[in-house]
Image (cartoon, rainbow, N blue to C red):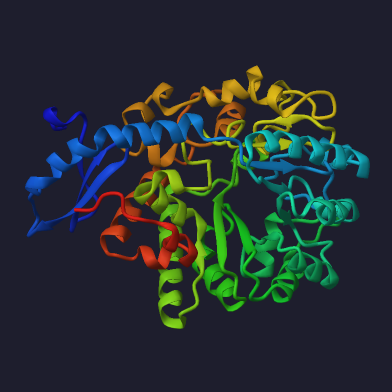
Amino acid sequence: MANNTRGLSFSDVDSDWKLALDPENVFWGVIPKDNGRFVLPDNLIDFYKKERKHLDSELFNFRFHEPLNCVYIDPTDRCNANCLYCYIPSRIRKHGTQMTTEELDTTLKKIEEYFKRVKKKPVIVFHAAEPLLVKDIIFGAIKKYHKKFLFGIQTNALLLEKEDTDFIRKYRIGIGISLDADMKEINNRSRITTLGKGNYEKAVKALNWFKGYEGLNVICTVTKYNVDRLSMLVKFLHKKKVPLVLLNPVRLTQERAVRLKPDDMAYSRNLIAAVDTAIELSKKTKRQIVIGNMANVVLAIISPTARRMMCDISPCGGGRTFLTITANGDMVPCGEFIGFKEFSGGNIFKTSIEKAMNSMPFKKIRNRIVEKIDECNTCDFRHICGSPCPAEMYARGNLYGKAKFCEFYKEIIRHAFKLIAEDKVKYILREDAIKQLEYEYKL
């Protein structure tokens, strides 16, 4: 550590690049080594001192003052699938409640009322178990409120029909399809239907229907079963003209998911290979496929306040920039907390979003910051990783435990710095995202 620079630290990215980083505000410089030697540019420290105060303030405001901008609505607790790693307890998925048309309308009216005061057009995502089990009421709500909100739907595609895709395109709804592998037998091993089959055929059919649609994304949950197939999945999805894929770690909120966790090094190695595959495909075909996980890490480095996936910031976005409303009206910081009644911040049918945001359960999640987590509090990457996920750690017995995927995150972040140094950002971020960025500082 350099004593005169308030914590500017130096570490190896790889054999070719050295990293200078202030962990407190993510000021950074990636500097080439010369025959293994490292020479610090004379102007870097002076420039760092000049920008430090501004960057401190910017990151602090993003962490603690970014407003609510997204609401996940779970219009039904029930599901027509029985995925091995689902974070929703099986008793809820089998016997849970469903919203009525009137209840969903009440929910959206209260959300509209909240955002009128803060003058922001929010994102509403129909999520949770399987929202298309109540397709009619959510489509009716979208028709009514499409000028008030930006809508998204996350689905396993089992109930998706061709005419639904016309509706989704008409109203410019974001659509996320759940698919874990390019091969049926691997995908259906984890994404099992309640009839004991899988969602592979329906998901692939849906991808064909949506081919070329800008609002399409695929969410893949990475387990030990599919971790070695990530590059093949990227190739498969690129052929289907999928613009964005998320290769998310299996969340260990429920005990049954723990045995599915992939090894950190196997996961990082395969995700990096998938990113390299996406870059090569984007170069070769001039048609981009973005891996959202790596894109968000790169954004966390080059433009920390521009990231939109709020799991990898401390505190996380749960109960801060987003919340979840369950089918019975309970408001929880994040869907991962559905199985924990103690994290309800109130009921939307009885109280308000404001009260939920100010409730003790929501504050408890916002109070989980990396400065309070052993090892994370001294890690250089603490404000790039954020040590997710609080629900996962609470379920494992220690809300303030460090991330279960700690070594994976470190490897991915180091690789992100390498990609930035090699000027590959243009292949990692979506083109529209790059156009919105402006240099704030550059040596």
Position of residue 394 relative to residue 388, above or below, is above
| Residue at 53% in and 58% down | 227
Residue 28 coordinates in the image, percent (x, y) = 25, 45
Instruction: Report the residue that reaches farthest toward the top.
Output: 360
Residue 68 coordinates in the image, percent (x, y) = 61, 36
**Can residue 254 be spotted in the picture?**
no
| Residue at 73% in and 48% down | 127
Q: Is residue 276 left or right of residue 189?
A: left
Q: Is residue 355 left or right of residue 8?
A: right
Position of residue 46 relative to residue 131, above or below, is above
Q: Is residue 152 left or right of residue 7?
A: right
**Of residues 273 and 170, the one drawn nearer to the viewer in this rendering:** 170
Q: Is residue 52 left or right of residue 72?
A: left
Give the position of the N terminus as an image quadrant: top left
Tell me where residue 10 sits by quadrant: top left
**Can residue 35 be spotted in the picture?**
yes
Residue 292 coordinates in the image, percent (x, y) = 51, 57
**Of residues 83 and 206, the one drawn nearer to the viewer in this rendering:** 206
| Residue at 23% in and 53% down | 442
Give the number of marks: 0
**Of residues 382 and 35, the one drawn nearer to the viewer in this rendering:** 382
Residue 405 coordinates in the image, percent (x, y) = 47, 41
